[in-house]
Amino acid sequence: MSKITESTKISEMMKKHPETVSVLKRLNVDCFGCLGAEQESVRNLAWSHGLDLAALIEELNGSLKK
């Protein structure tokens, strides 16, 4: 299983791991339909939304189906 890293693209993450969408919704991050999701990485998402990068990555990876 692939892990989510700071360089993972948001659109790729949502396609491969739809369970991460609930994390984004809980954090009030709406990436659906956003043109930036195709190019934006988890690192950029954290920065642009004022989120702690390490905590975000941990939570996203924690949501992955085992």
Image (tube, grey):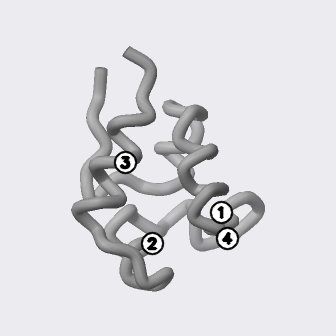
Q: Nearer the viewer, mark 3 or mark 4?
A: 3
Res. 35 mark: 4
Kindly report the distance in space between the C-alpha atoms of the residues bearing marks 3 and 1: 17 Å
Q: Amino acid at mark 3?
A: Glu
* Quadrant where the image shows the C terminus: top left
Q: Mark 2 highlights which residue? A: 45
Q: Secondary structure at mark 4?
A: helix
The location of residue 45, given as percent across then percent down, is 45, 72
Structural crowding at the residue carrying mark 3, measured as other residues with C-alpha within 10 Å and reported as few (<14), some (14–19) or many (≥20):
some
For marks 2 and 3, the one nearer the N-term is 2
Res. 66 mark: none
Q: Amino acid at mark 2?
A: Leu
Q: Identify which residue, 38 or 6, lies in the foreground.
A: 6
Kindly identify the residue that appears in the image at 70 percent across and 69 percent down: 34
Q: Nearer the viewer, mark 4 or mark 2?
A: 2
The location of residue 28, given as percent across then percent down, is 65, 68
